[in-house]
Structure formats: C-alpha cells, structure tokens
Amino acid sequence: MTDIVALGSAGSARDALRNDGLTCVELTWIAKKIEFWIRFGSVDREEILDRCRRVLWFRPGAVFAFVRWASNDFGTMISRLDVVLAVASRQAYQTLPFVRPGGDILLTAQGWHSVERVLQTIDAIERLGIDPEAVSPDHWRHVHHRMTAGQEPGVYTLDLHCAYLLRRRVQP
C-alpha cells in the first residue's frame, strides 16, 4: 500500500529518510526535457512536491528499476536505467544520483539502445507472470555483465525463478 502525501519541500523527504532508514528516490517529469521514472518496484511511500516532482521511498530489500532520460535543444543528453536493491541502515552501498543514500546497483544500462534492451528483458519477465522485483538479484547482475561484454544475456525462465525461490528458503 502506498501513502501519498502532498508537501512543499524536499527537506521533509531528507528528514524522513534519516528517521526510518528507507531509500529515497527523487523523480522529475518535464515532458520531453527531463523524465525520471520507476519502471518497477514496490513503493512504500510517496510525497508529491509539485506537479513536476515527487519523492518515492523503498524499504530495505526492495528492488526497483530507475529510468532517467533527459534532452536539450540538440537531442538526448542521458538515457540510463539502473536496477537497484535498497539497502538497510549500515549496509554498504553505491551512490547514485537522485537516490539517497544509494543502493546495491545490480544493473546499469546507458544509452538508449542498452536501456531499450533492458526494458525488453523486463517485459519478457513480466510475460512469464513474474514480478521483476522478485527476480534473482544474480540475474540482474548477469544481464549487466553480459550486456557490458557485448553479449546477449541469458533468458530468465520459470525454472530459474523457482530455483531462486527455493534457494532463498534454505539459505539464512
């Protein structure tokens, strides 16, 4: 369940982050200029700052895909997708713009061609009836490494997903 709160300052977002250990993601949407959005992930809380900006919070252990696209008068400046695992307090993390404090970055794709390939991978997982947030973190790392090496990533299957779920049950 998502709580939506309309507030006027990002300061309250930073204060809430310090108090409850959630991962905060700042989103901006100015059509055809700056478009930051979440492709998948379970949002714990949402704060609407104004009609173009909002802040989302994710609980530790949540996996989400953060897409950033921006352009100027000359074309696209950035096209990036990160699959991030939200970390608990005192866990190691990597920093990422607009994500506080940061997270365990499972996959990074830069450039529209790479971002589109990851979006197609996410679509294929959803067609199997699997929530992309529930996919093995190792699979997201696999996709990242294969794409970085210029190779086609392996397909995530129901068998792989069942094996991951069973492994999670027996590991502490």
Image: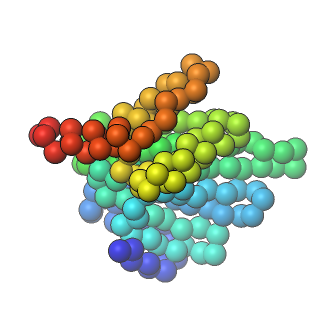
On-image quarter of the N terminus? bottom left
Q: Residue at x 49, y 80 (%)?
A: 6
In this view, the residue in front, 1 or 102, is: 1
User: Residue 136 location in percent, x, y?
Assistant: 35, 41
* Colour scheme: rainbow
Instruction: Examine the rendering and report whether any part of residue 19 can be seen.
Output: yes
User: Residue 145 location in percent, x, y?
Assistant: 49, 25
In this view, the residue in front, 23 or 135, is: 135
Q: Residue at x 59, y 67 (%)?
A: 53
Q: Is residue 43 above or below residue 160?
A: below
Instruction: Examine the rendering and report whether any part of residue 93 can be seen.
Output: no
User: Residue 81 location in percent, x, y?
Assistant: 57, 44
User: Residue 18 location in percent, x, y?
Assistant: 30, 58
Q: Residue at x 35, y 38 (%)?
A: 160
**Residue at the extreme top of the image, as rendered:** 149
In this view, the residue in front, 167 or 6, is: 167
Q: Is residue 138 above or below residue 51?
A: above
Instruction: Please tell me how many numbered marks the rendered image carries.
Output: 0
Q: Is residue 69 above or below residue 115?
A: below
Q: Quadrant of residue 115?
A: top right
On-image quarter of the C terminus? top left
| Horizontal side of residue 22 vs 126, given as left or right | left
In this view, the residue in front, 48 or 130, is: 130
Q: Residue at x 62, y 49 (%)?
A: 68
